[in-house]
Amino acid sequence: MMLVRAFISHYRRHPLQLAALALMIVLATMLWTGVTVLTDQARTSLFQSEQAVATRVHVVRTDAQPVGVDDFAQLRMAGVCVAPWLEIQRPPPEGRVIGIDPLAMGCFGEAAPGGNAGELDGAPFLDISEAAKLADDGYDSRLYLLTANGSVVLPEGYALRDFSLGPSTGELADSFLLNLDALSLLVLLITGLLVRSVHRLGIAQRQQSFDLLYRFGVPRERVRQFLALELVVLTGICVLPGLWLGAQLAGMLGGGFGQALDSLFDVTVYAGSAESLPWQAAGVMVVLVLAVCLVDWLLPRRWQTAAVSARGRLLAVAVLLFGLVGVALAPGLGWVFVGTALVFAGTGWLTPGLLALLARWLSDRTDGKASDPLTRWRRRELAVMFSHLALPVVALQFAMATVLAVQALVTTFEQTFDEWLAQRLEAEFYVEVPRGADAGLAAEHLQSLAGIGAWHRVIRGEARMTVDKGESVPVDLFALTPVSDLVAGWTLLASIDQPWRGLEQGGVMLNEQLARRRQLDVGDNLTVTIADSVISADIVAIYADYGRPAGEILVAGGALPESFRARFESFSVNPGDLDMADIREQLADVWSVPEVTVRDNASIRALASQVFGQTFLLTRAISLLTLVLAAIALLIMGWVFFTTRVWYFRLLGIWGLPARAIQRQLRRLSVTLTLAVTMAALPLGIWLTWVLVSRINPLAFGWSLPMDLYPLFWIELGLVAAVTGLVVAHLMRRQLVQRAGEAQGET
Amino acid sequence: MSSAVLVARGLSKDFTSGGQRVPVLSGLSLCVRPGESLAVVGRSGSGKSTLLNLLCGLQAPKEGLITVAGESFRRPRKSSERSDDDARWAELRRRSIGVVFQEANLMPALSLVDNVRLRAHLAGHATGGERGWLERLGVGAEADRYPDQVSGGQAQRAALAMVFAMAPALILADEPTGSLDRHTADAVADCLFAMQGDSGCALVLATHDSELAARCDHLLDLSALDPAGTE
Amino acid sequence: MRMRFGVIVLFVAAALAGCSDSSTQGGFAGLAQQVGEVDERTFLQPQPGDRLVFPRDWGPHPQHRIEWWYLTANLETPDGKLLGLQWTQFRQALQPRPLDREPPDPETWPLEAAWMAHGAVSFEGEHWFTEKLARGDMGHAGATAEPFRVWLDDWRLQAVPGSDEWRLQVAGEDWRYDLRLANTGGIVAHGDEGFSAKSASGEGSMYFSLVDLKIEGTVTLGDKTLEVSGTGWFDREWSSQFLKAGQQGWDWFALHLETGDKLMAFQLREDDSAFLSGSWINPQRDVESVTGDELTLTPARWRETQDGRVPEEWRLKIPAQDVDLTIKAPPGDYWNSGLYPYWESPVSVTGSHEGVGYMELTGYGP
């Protein structure tokens, strides 16, 4: 009982300390829970999508033409159980929908694909007739004919292929999940550091009481048991609201997350919001908290002192270098993460010591200047703080570096994507070719118009690309005719001289995804089957193609054989001297349709931008939340730490330094501290940016981005740090005043 | 009296304890001239530390007048007066009043010599003679060590060096040898009195130690003046 | 008169009324949601005085809500074992299509009509059944009058070119049959020259039958192929009626009697009464309508099955014709367990006349 009273009385006297620890655990649990719920949802969704099509294959035409309604009827009448699967890609918020025919699925029995899809309410399934209407409205659509795996006897002219929701994106989606896992591990690491630092500080303050208890005859083991028990109870209590908050967080981010998955990998988040609280996250948190707080009892003391010894530092440098080299040379995503972890470990190990060293060096530099021993004191004090606040300093450094890198990635992506979109949307108007209409007639008509500006016809369909050993894989086919000035402004990632002429003369261009996946480069020769003809062509250029995983080849329209059937056709038109309304009417006449859908540049741009706005929402949100958490932790830590130094600030007052001057010192000290952490975060953040755009992104998403830096954001981050510092100073000032009041209570 | 460094008249101070006002000092007066030393003794709680706090402006009296080095202070009536007083007190502590506590007189982040340098700098003295002060107090060899690297006696000597380096008019010492063993305490006290004699400054020393108190010119026993009259 | 009158109709009725009966929604996976309100008057209703027109009426009637092509056959193997089989194809319109309107474009995956086919074989106490569904107007399910052809996926009944015969090919998962059908008689129009009343208040359907089908072919059950031959009964019926409120189900019989007479009889069961009707077809194939006053139909014995209790034995009496029949299902379980389960079994007839036939019972079970 005495022990319990002693333990409780400490917190009664220092309720803020308890509150700080509790807050840390709650916030850490929230963040971790939020991330795990989302990752789990993504995993479940991927799993479900794979399940939905796991035992399923789809029927393709051996002439590489897309399958159509007549193929469906013909296969059914030949006794093949096939069901249509009509995918419509729409911009958010609707996103992708899949049209299915519940009647046709009857032949699958229980194992119907999407059979447990529930209601046909467009999330994502709806009746195929509704989906077909959307396709008619001009959304990109694609029909698959699913069949059951097994001994299916197909009529001549058809073949079976494995059906996957996003063509060959399985690995990419895995990488995406790996990315999320890595991010959540980073979050876990940061939160662990924070919880530990707050806890250690409390223990340090209570050391005297523990010594006293020991002198009263309480074995140290027993004190430890009580400490562990106290921690278990506290964690148990704090994990609950943390879990709940985390679930709320996941709910808030879930929509954007679904969109991101959808637009990135064609994976719809079926799992939806978590129905029950993710208890396993609670378990992880309890273990984490206990581990980081009680690890000192487990590790030999020798190790702990060795960590900050010269030899320990040398080891840290070795770890850091090993990580840097590892990331640069890593063959796969997993190794990149291992290398990154090593770099983080090495950096975290070294940073507080280096910062302290730097502060001491700076203070020594003032040695010669008799002018200001106070500055010297402040820098010395700073050095002490770097050592004592090592853990929260490192946590803040990691969080800032992550935010910095993610911000750079996202901004680079947005800018690159904007530019890319601008290149792609060179024309003023886009005309959808209505179903069944002959695009050739329209092309002839446009050709005959005097005064019309640049225009071309866009044809999309499927082709097969021969890879090693005669095996062939499906790729999206993109054709342009004529190769007009509209494409002249495209930035190509790699190309021969005069790539567009090369294209007209029978070359092919590849999107970056395909080039990376198949390790193809300009000048390589490619064998492509388009409809019934086999084309051998040199790669003349590789172009960026953001936001979707599918591999694509671009050919000149002239290379398409007669038998080729397009999946989607449109015209990009600059009307030039003509009026677009007239062209529209003329095309309606040419096609004998009442209405022709024409979109202007701006509306397409808006649609496309919306899709991609969602892509990095989650990453950005998580990293920002981590930063907030780290800042709060530093705030608490800084505050609590300053409390232990409050006497020395009073000493300054006793030595006659006016209160304002003391507060100025306090501000300078805390702001220098947070700004120094920001500075320390910069190199790590820049390096992490490089890792994200040049190493992880190509592996996880299939495309790379240029490496850009955004010093303006560094300044913003610096401002956040400065504000954190000022808040610490302000809290501290209150503490000084309060202490002065307390001093009057003594005699 | 006009040449006195420190004059206090009718000092009173109360504390609130358990909702009740408890008088600690009541109508206390004292006077210390340059070169004089005054020992303040009394049992625990009799108000020794409080008196010293009043005499250097860290606390304000309920009633009474304090004059230090020609600056006079009454209990401030308005907040503007208070901040004015605070500034005058700060200036006095900076240049004229040296304060020594039982322990923790040094900035742990600075070496002994840097501590002395900082204190002298605050007092407005050109730096340069710090090592000399440390040597005079017998800790010259430890000048570049940090407070946690020296003994308690050495730390107190360094604290005294800091005080003398600022050339104070008045030294307020609150149990300066309280945490030292007899032998060390005597040595530190020897230093204190020797240096005080040399510099001609006034000394007010609060202590439990009757031997130490006996070395002072005057004695003020707060227990004998118990305002609550419990003795 | 066939059970389908109820089965699909009930389904659509539920769908249109926004009824959320899970059993009806489960199977068609929300198909109902696609059906908007349909103006009842736009479906054509059979009226007394409507006449059959050939060859048109072999084909589909897009202005009517429901119709079917329905074959039951009482066959024998070479060693004299009895084998019953059934093939039915239903058309269920979700919206009527006037004669002057073109069928919808398959590219739009239209949902104006749904097709359903049932195939079943009953042999030695065992019953095989398969159901197929299809969206209409897509090409893989439909019917044409000339040449006569009714198909859904690879199941088809079609006129053999250059002969008067039809060929029926149906395959379930582990069974199939391939039959040739020759009509040795004429066309039997029920009711008022094809208009068959279905309630006392005069609603009804257009209904004719072929009762003299000579059938030969093979039936494969598992890895065993049987030569079969015998007699079939083919029904064509179309209407736009729902089952009336209060009607629970029906019992329908098509009987081949050894005297050369044929008998079709049914009753629509209501809460405390029934609407009975039938056709007595003499060897000269004169059709005599039998009304409810002249016909009694009573369950004589019940059979407990896994899916519920059904009347396995019936007494059918037409006193004016001196007909008193005991109609009995062979041992076994003859549920067609599709979206809407019903009982369809071959029967033997004893009593005033001997014979064989088919019996369809709906509205029983759990």
Image (tube, grey):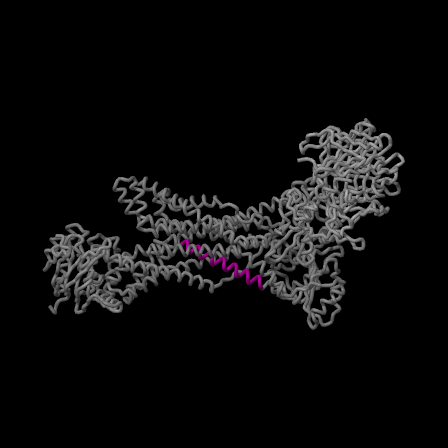
* Residue B102 falls left or right of residue A561: left
Residue A411 painted magenta: yes
- The answer to which of C320 and A416 lies nearer the viewer is C320
Return the x and y of residue A156 as percentages of the image width and height: 76, 45
Q: Main secondary structure of the magenta part?
A: helix
- The answer to which of A10 and A264 lies nearer the viewer is A10
Q: Quadrant of residue C1?
A: top right
* Residue A148 falls left or right of residue A743: right
C66 over A683 or under it: above or below: above
Q: Quadrant of residue A283?
A: top left
Q: Residue at x 70, y 71 (%)?
A: A579
- The answer to which of A733 and A275 lies nearer the viewer is A275
- Residue B62 seen in the current view: yes
Return the x and y of residue B13 as percentages of the image width and height: 19, 60
Residue extent of the magenta highlight: A394-418
Return the x and y of residue A402 as percentages of the image width and height: 47, 56
Quadrant, the C terminus of chain A = bottom left
Which residue occupies the extreme top position in the image? Answer: C79
Return the x and y of residue C9 as percentages of the image width and height: 72, 44
A455 over B183 or under it: above or below: below
Quadrant, the N terminus of chain A = top left
- Residue B127 seen in the current view: no
Q: Residue at x 44, y 52 (%)?
A: A344
* Residue C156 falls left or right of residue B133: right
Q: Residue at x 56, y 47 (%)?
A: A271
